[in-house]
Image: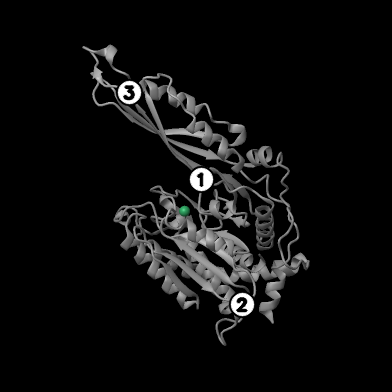
Amino acid sequence: MASRLIASRFRCVIGAPADYLGCPFASYIDSFYFRKGFRPEGPSIVNSVSRKAPTDSGAEAQRRLAYFSARRDEMVSTIRELVEIESPSDNKSAVDRVAEAVAAKFSRLGGEVRFHRAKDFGNHLQVNFGGKSAKPVLLLGHYDTVYPLGTLATMPCRIEHNKLTGPGVLDMKSGIALMLHALAALQDWHGGLQGKERHGGLPRPVTVLLVSDEEVGSDSSRAITEAMANKAAAVLVLEPSYGRQGAVKTARKGVGEYLVKVTGKASHAGLDFGKGVNAILELARQIEKTSSFTDLKKGLTVNVGIVSGGSRTNVVPADAAAQVDVRIARIKDAAGIDKKMRSLRPFNRKCKIEITGGINRPPMERTTGVAALYAQAATIARDLGWKLGEAAVGGGSDGNFTAGLGIPTLDGLGGVGDGAHATHEHILISELPRRAALIAGLIEAV
Ligand SMILES: [Zn+2]
């Protein structure tokens, strides 16, 4: 049967070399990962390795590309529909609205829909495409956005040449649409829903998890994400890809946040200058100290992003505070930087210092499991006719949590475009077909 043939063809991995030269972070990856002994090929986690002649898999890939190209407008209209339901993280009823719309679409594909109720945020959505025979692949994403309600008025969802614009179109409503269309295609290719085939007509069990609070730290969804990941064979994160070439993300930095609060003593700057203890002066010294913890060779950065303090120019300030962003590329650096932050002591002993916060997202490191997933993706992309790059990025996602558990995770599989979180946010429409084909191929292969 054609569907079985497709499956076996896309289950083969030919150990394609990683596209390091095409990657804008090549030098960072080279200097960092190769010293750690990682190799792009990594051991394959593929079940069956049946090498097919490249022309066979290439022809099949072209058929798949044509399938999605013929459905490009459908994909665009799915994305538009989702973008036009605004869903800022801090508005539960708005996020619940998009959740319901997305759930209805997955339900029409035969998925078993389940909401994880959240009190202060939108509900999180889990969809199971059943089967206990094998571990599912987890498709991970979020439907909240950073844009307040009403943004559509100034930033409408519209097509401008090859671009589709709108709030959250790249991050990551196009990713959700890609999940839907890739799953629908797999059902088509593998016999569909007639006769209630195994796994809801899919070649393997799939779990979808879409959370409502990713843009604000994932506090209410983290435990669910981790529980789902622990049951999965691999995690595919459909967050935006990197750059115009649509590189996937094989490493993300871990993130920490700290608040450094200084208390001094207020006094009149003219009458009692000597009686005051200047908290801002103390904080300035602490800012220099914390900033010196940055170690670029390790990919460790400390950024004092927000400072506050004082009340009037003629008052020696009693209070000052700094909010600090810490990024780590390696989990082994977490304890060290955390200890340094917590060990800050006042330069001026008349000041008091209070440190709160910590590392809240582990880094997604390019482990052998991650590298193997990337190698599979690169092979599928090559058959589709393009060279899939990879990137190490500083920003975190929920992929950090799943990779932190040691579950093979590939991130940045979603839309290709630019301007996430910005007024020019858009995706490139022409990239949708091969993106969908890549995701469908990966769901089969891992
Ligand atoms: Zn995102």
Q: Is mark 3 within 8 Å of ligand 1?
A: no
Indicate how the structure is coloured in the image. Answer: one colour
> Along the line of sight, which residue is nearer the eye, 172 or 23?
172
> Along the line of sight, which residue is nearer the eye, 40 or 120?
120
Q: Position of residue 435 (x, y in %)?
A: 57, 61
Residue 150 visible in the shown view:
yes
Q: How many marks?
A: 3
Residue 395 circle label: 1
Q: Secondary structure at mark 2?
A: helix
Q: Position of residue 223 (x, y in %)?
A: 49, 58
Asked which quadrant contains residue 4, the reply is: bottom right
Could you tell which of marks 2 and 1 lies nearer the N-terminus? Answer: 2
Q: Position of residue 409 (x, y in %)?
A: 60, 56
Image quarter hosting the C terminus: bottom right
Identity, as a three-letter code, of the amino acid under mark 3: Gly
Q: CA distance from mark 2 to mark 1?
A: 36 Å
Check disc 2 and report the residue beneath it.
189
In the rendered image, the vertical position of residue 318 relative to residue 362, given as above or below: above
Image quarter hosting the N terminus: bottom right
Could you tell which of marks 3 and 2 lies nearer the N-terminus? Answer: 2
> Which of label 2 and label 1 is nearer to you?
1
Mark 3, other Cα within 10 Å: few <14 / some 14–19 / many ≥20? many
Asked which quadrant contains residue 124, the reply is: bottom left
Residues tagged 1 and 3 counted as in contact (Cβ below 8 A): no
In the rendered image, the vertical position of residue 63 relative to residue 289, given as above or below: below
Identity, as a three-letter code, of the amino acid under mark 1: Gly
Residue 194 circle label: none
For the point 58% across and 41% down, which residue is it? 329
> Along the line of sight, which residue is nearer the eye, 260 or 191?
260
> Which of label 1 and label 3 is nearer to you?
3
Check disc 3 and report the residue beneath it.
264
Q: CA distance from mark 1 to mark 3?
A: 35 Å
